[in-house]
Image (spheres, grey):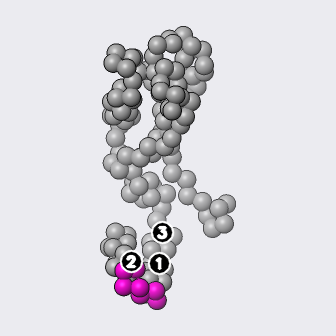
Amino acid sequence: AERARLAQLAQLRELGATADMVQVYAALQRLFVNTTEADMSFSLGRFFRVQFMGNVPASRKDREFVVRFQHHPHVSEVKREIELQVAGMLPKGTPVRFLPDSAGEDEVLAEPTAAFVKLTALRMVRRGPGGG
């Protein structure tokens, strides 16, 4: 239902039909209000926070970002995908290591030739009206 409404909204936007767009937005809002946190999480996919440390390019060093998977992969699949992406940025043969969230700088310093990735599965949180 949501995709159909969004497609309808795009068509109305092209036509400049503002009054009809208001009705579609109201319908989308009703869909959102009646949607549970689990429904939202499933429809949006899985999100992971990724942080690079260690022997990585300067443009990535100590940077973090969020990556989204439209399906719901197992963490091992996510690690494989990220490892492939990271390996493409590094000199051939540079080891890629995944660190738990609790890992500190000692683990990174212990292996100075390796690239390290901290991977954190993120959870969808739905806030009420007003952000509370």
Separation (CA) of disc 2 from disc 1: 8 Å
- The residue singled out by tag 3 in the image is 32
22 up-or-down from 33: above or below: below
- The crowd level at tag 2 (other Cα within 10 Å; few <14, some 14-19, many 20+) is many
Q: Give the main secondary structure, helix, strand or loop, of the magenta stretch.
A: helix
Q: Position of residue 9 (x, y in %)?
A: 39, 77
SS at mark 1 in the image = helix
Task: Give yes or no for residue 10 being in the magenta stretch.
Answer: no
- The residue singled out by tag 2 in the image is 9
- The residue singled out by tag 1 in the image is 25
* Residue 88 occupies quadrant: top left
The amino acid type, in three-letter code, at marker 3 is: Phe
- 125, 17: nearer the viewer: 17
Q: Position of residue 53 (x, y in %)?
A: 52, 25
Residue at screen point 42% across, 59% down? 39
Residue 130, numbered label: none
114 up-or-down from 83: above or below: above
Q: Say whether marks 2 and 1 touch (CB < 8 Å).
A: yes
The amino acid type, in three-letter code, at marker 1 is: Tyr
Magenta-tinted stretch: 13-19
Compared across the picture, whether 52 is left or right of 70 comes to: right
